[in-house]
Image (cartoon, rainbow, N blue to C red):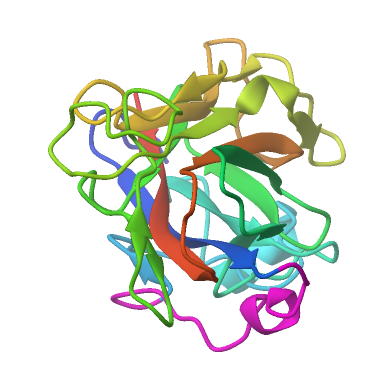
């Protein structure tokens, strides 16, 4: 049976919650923030259809049969899995905790840790795809759970003063995919899979950042896992003590 074309028609997106804590000098909120009752607006996955990848997903003949997949079932997916290959249904990224500061400061984190690996799965006749990350809305802000205080993730500068975008808040998030590591499925290779370049969000200029992309030399019927992507968020001076979060989305599109 002939495989159907799978280009310029598929985009899937999964929600991802970024979390950090500004404290009065302790790590009091770190445990509660890590899985402590936060949920993603609209559920854990948005704009997603087709088969979900559950369990230890291997592209073997038996797994294809169980999942209802065959050579005529184009399938392109992105999601987060733990170290055993099981889905992480409500993925989050914890940037950690930082004391209140009278000066501008930065906090760092990692996207893609051992228990929350970003996995790309491609069962199709198309070897071209791109994975990117963006805010759920480019006008969103980091928002405190208690005080409702806000600051930006896509200001033109990392300084605390607002840089001239549509909001009145400073703050900028930088993502460096080039620091990451790609791990292919056993029996597959990472040939043709490229890490994105370091970039900072800037409203209306850089609204999404490429994490991974493939070229014509990439394999199909494989998955790849991404870990160790560096994150840096600029925090304005005198930002209120609180537990902050912002909704992000990770998308994959067939080129």
Q: Nearer the viewer, residue 188 or 159?
A: 159
Residue farthest along the front direction in this orientation: 102
Left or right of 115? Residue 210 is left
Q: Is residue 31 magenta?
A: yes
The residue lying toward the viewer, choosing from 4 and 84, is 84
Membership of 151 in magenta stretch: no
Quarter location, residue 209: top left
Q: Main secondary structure of the magenta part?
A: loop
Above/below status of 185 relative to 28: above
Residue 25, position as x, y percentages in the image: 74, 67
Q: Position of residue 64 (x, y in %)?
A: 62, 60
Residue at the limit of the structure toward the left, as seen here:
166
The answer to whether 225 is drawn above or below residue 255 in the figure is below
Indicate the position of residue 227 as horizontal and vertical percent values. 75, 41
Residue sitting at x 72%, y 15%: 191
Quarter placement of the N terminus: top left
Of 237 and 132, which appears nearest the observer? 237
Depth check: 121 or 163 in front? 163
Name the residue: 56% across, 63% down: 19
Q: Residue at x 72, y 70 (%)?
A: 86
- From where the camera sits, is residue 78 visible? yes
Question: Which quadrant would the C terminus be assigned to in this image?
Answer: top left
Instruction: Reply above or below: 3 against 56.
Output: above
Q: Is residue 123 left or right of residue 75?
A: right
Residue 132 on image: x %, y %: 44, 35
Q: How many marks?
A: 0
Question: In percent of the image, x 84 and y 66: which residue is there?
Answer: 84
The residue segment tinted magenta is: 25-43
Give the farthest residue toward the bottom: 37
Q: Is residue 126 visible?
A: no
Among the 4 quarters of the image, the one containing residue 159: top left
């Amino acid at each position: 049976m002939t495989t159907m074309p799978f280009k310029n028609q598929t985009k899937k997106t999964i929600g991802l919650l970024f979390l950090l804590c500004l404290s009065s000098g302790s790590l009091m909120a770190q445990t509660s923030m890590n899985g402590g009752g936060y949920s993603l607006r609209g559920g854990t996955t948005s704009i997603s259809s087709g088969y979900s990848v559950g369990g230890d997903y291997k592209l073997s003949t038996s797994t294809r049969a169980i999942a209802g997949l065959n050579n005529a079932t184009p399938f392109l997916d992105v999601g987060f899995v733990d170290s055993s290959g099981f889905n992480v249904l409500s993925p989050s990224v914890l940037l950690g905790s930082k004391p209140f500061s009278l000066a501008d400061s930065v906090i760092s984190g990692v996207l893609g840790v051992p228990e929350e690996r970003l996995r790309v799965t491609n069962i199709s006749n198309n070897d071209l795809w791109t994975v990117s990350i963006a805010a759920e809305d480019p006008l969103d802000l980091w928002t405190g759970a208690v005080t409702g205080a806000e600051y930006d993730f896509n200001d033109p500068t990392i300084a605390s003063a607002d840089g001239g975008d549509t909001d009145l808040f400073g703050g900028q998030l930088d993502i460096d995919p080039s620091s990451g590591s790609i791990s292919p499925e056993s029996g597959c290779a990472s040939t043709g899979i490229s890490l994105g370049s370091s970039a900072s969000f800037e409203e209306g200029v850089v609204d999404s950042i490429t994490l991974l992309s493939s070229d014509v030399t990439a394999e199909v019927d494989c998955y790849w896992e991404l870990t160790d992507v560096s994150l840096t968020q600029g925090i304005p001076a005198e930002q209120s003590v609180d537990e902050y979060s912002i909704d992000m989305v990770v998308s994959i599109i067939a080129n």
